[in-house]
Image (tube, grey):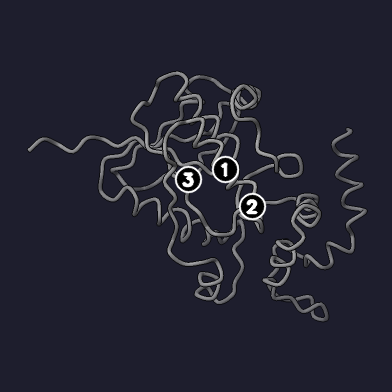
Amino acid sequence: MSEKPVRHVLGLSGGKDSAALAIYLKDEGLAPDIEYFFTDTGAELPEIYEYLDKLETYLGKEIVRLNSGRDFEHHLKIHGHFLPSARQRWCTREMKIRPFEKFVGDDEVVSYIGIRADEDREGYISRRPNIKPVFPFKEAGLVREDIFRILENSVGVPEYYKWRSRSGCYFCFFQRREEWIGLYEHHPELFQKALKLEKYDPTTQEGYTWIEGISLQKMLEQRERIVELATKKKEG
């Protein structure tokens, strides 16, 4: 029997970098047999699903949808209603990494990762010996401006970048305060869902909140000031 062929995979997050990488590899003919996948937490922004449909059309190939088999509320209950945070990213582990590792199994895999040459980070690197990460943008020296150029010449930039700096769940704890305000303005129903997930006692000021030291309700009361400070920062 012949050896099983190496699989080439690329995870699409619904964000600009992974989308641009998929388009770059296709247009340059660098990975013709690549498998595209998207790991769905069930808590993504609506714009992400719309963008994935556009990408699928452009790439001319199915984007396999993965998931953990359980919704976020189930995982939250299992973790004692302790909200995920930058220090405790159990949501990434349970709802992104495990479905991906199940998807590739024990196959030899080359995983294409969209980290740019102007970024000083690794992203998720599997510790499994059968998964080899590669970074085409770093190797080619492509930076942020290149990524936007690739997208503008093909499927366009995801709509949510008008008010948010990253893809991911609607309650992503990496959001800046002004981005939470953006969620409130663009998807008020999702903002309310995120607010209800907090376990916070305003009297004792104790509990679990998405933003360390402040509840979403309290942050909303400071809405005008937050927007004002964000505007001044952009201007200069």
Residue 204 locus on image (x, y percent): 79, 80
**Looking at this view, is 173 or 152 the one in front?**
152
Dot 2: within a 10 Å radius of its alpha carbon, few (fewer than 14), some, or many (20 or more) residues?
A: some
Vertical position of residue 60 compared to residue 66: above or below: above
* Camera-side mark, 1 or 3: 1
Residue 194 lies left or right of residue 39; in this view the side is right
Answer with mark 3 or mark 2, whichever residue precedes in sequence. 2
Dot 1: within a 10 Å radius of its alpha carbon, few (fewer than 14), some, or many (20 or more) residues?
A: many
Residue 48 locus on image (x, y percent): 60, 46
Residues under numbered marks 1 and 2 in contact, where contact means CB atoms less than 8 Å apart: yes
Q: Which residue is mark 1?
A: 14
Q: Residue at 74% of width from left, 62% of height from top?
A: 191
Q: Which mark is residue 45?
A: 2
Residue 228 lies left or right of residue 164; in this view the side is right
* Camera-side mark, 3 or 2: 2
Query: Disc 1 residue type?
Result: Gly
Q: Residue at 50% of width from left, 34% of height from top?
A: 57
Label 2 sits on a secondary structure element that is loop
Residue 80 locus on image (x, y percent): 55, 77
